[in-house]
Image (cartoon, helix red, strand yellow):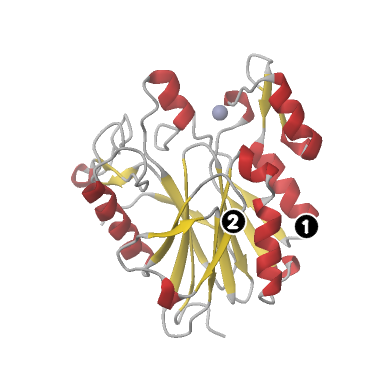
């Protein structure tokens, strides 16, 4: 099955992917405006969001395709731009891909018998995948402006540390999000965020105030002592193979899909 994706580099004991808009069964506007060029069989959209007006059956099929691709059930959350963190093991995660509840981070713990995955959905916000170098735990974190300000990253790192995984043992991969050139915000909003996260200061292509959320995320992770932080350069607004809420708003009524970052640990993979 064709499921276009970017590979996230999360060290030797975890696997990670960032999906695209391609490879599923959703119709426009929950599919890319330009179909995937290579594969006639998979022209539909891989919308993974249940909250964006797409057919529930289509989203369920898309989530099953992704679970099949990563080889395990996936822990999904209902994201609310807050700082709630849910810790789950493989036994807790629903094969059907139902939501674990209202959170902005899912931490999964290793099960030697079966792999387990956590997912974050985005369409401009920053998807962050974290993995312990030894594969004991991993996390998927949703970081928009609200989550950055609510310090969902700090909350997630604290939960991981409580599970015996300090930041020094973590690697992070920051997935595609909207770049500062495309993310204009009111001056007061920029000032608010930059006061707390100086690295998040940005400027649009037109020279107006903007936010650089991915840089803010990277700086937050590095300040916390995360061992290694990798970043995707792709901008959701500019890439037609990714979903962008802001692009959908500028070009239409804001309806669009969500793509995902997924981290997988456990089972026989990464066993020492
Ligand atoms: Zn951009």
Ligand 1 closer than 8 Å to the CB at disc 2?
Answer: no
Query: Regarding mark 1 in the picture, which secondary structure is present there?
Result: loop
Q: Disc number at residue 84?
A: 2
Image quadrant containing the C terminus = bottom right
Q: Which residue is rendered at x = 19% and y = 46% of the image?
A: 41
Q: Which residue is rendered at x = 80% and y = 53% of the image?
A: 223
Q: Quadrant of residue 228?
A: bottom right
Whether pointer 2 and pointer 1 mark residues with C-beta atoms closer than 8 Å, the reply is: no
Q: Which residue is rendered at x = 27% and y = 54% of the image?
A: 60
Where 111 sits versus 178, above or below? below
* Residue bearing the label numbered 1: 224
Q: Residue furthest front?
A: 102
Q: Nearer the viewer, residue 83 or 234?
A: 83
Q: Nearer the viewer, residue 43 or 185?
A: 185
Locate residue 269, reporting x and y percent: 47, 77
Locate residue 175, reporting x and y percent: 55, 47
Q: Quadrant of residue 63?
A: bottom left
Give the left or right position of residue 21, taking residue 155 as reference: left
Q: Disc number at residue 257?
A: none
Give the left or right position of residue 193, taking residue 268 as reference: right
Locate residue 44, reporting x and y percent: 24, 41
Residue 141 appears in view: yes
Q: CA distance from mark 2 to mark 1?
A: 18 Å
Query: Regarding mark 2 in the picture, which secondary structure is present there?
Result: loop
Give the left or right position of residue 96, taking residue 122 as reference: left
Residue 238 appears in view: no
């Amino acid at each position: 099955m064709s499921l276009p994706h970017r590979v996230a580099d999360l060290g030797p004991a975890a696997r990670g992917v960032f999906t695209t808009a391609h490879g599923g069964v959703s119709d426009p506007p929950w599919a890319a405006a330009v179909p995937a060029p290579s594969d006639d069989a998979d022209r539909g959209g891989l919308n993974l969001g249940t909250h964006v007006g797409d057919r529930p059956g289509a989203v369920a099929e898309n989530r099953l395709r992704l679970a099949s691709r990563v080889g395990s059930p996936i822990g999904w959350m209902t994201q609310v731009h807050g700082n709630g963190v849910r810790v789950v093991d493989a036994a807790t995660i629903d094969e059907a891909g139902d939501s674990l509840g209202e959170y902005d981070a899912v931490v999964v713990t290793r099960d030697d018998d079966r792999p387990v995955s956590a997912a974050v959905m985005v369409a401009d916000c920053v998807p962050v995948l974290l993995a312990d170098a030894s594969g004991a735990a991993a996390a998927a974190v949703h970081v928009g402006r609200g989550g950055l300000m609510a310090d969902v990253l700090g909350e997630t790192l604290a939960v991981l540390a409580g599970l015996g995984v300090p930041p020094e043992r973590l690697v992070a991969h920051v997935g595609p999000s909207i770049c500062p050139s495309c993310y204009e915000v009111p001056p007061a909003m920029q000032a608010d965020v930059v006061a707390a996260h100086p690295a998040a200061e940005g400027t649009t292509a037109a020279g107006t105030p903007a936010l650089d959320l991915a840089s803010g995320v990277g700086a937050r992770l590095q300040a916390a002592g995360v061992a290694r932080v990798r970043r995707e350069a792709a901008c959701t607004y500019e890439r037609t193979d990714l979903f962008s809420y802001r692009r959908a708003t500028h070009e239409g009524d804001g309806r669009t899909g969500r793509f995902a970052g997924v981290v997988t640990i456990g089972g026989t993979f990464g066993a020492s």
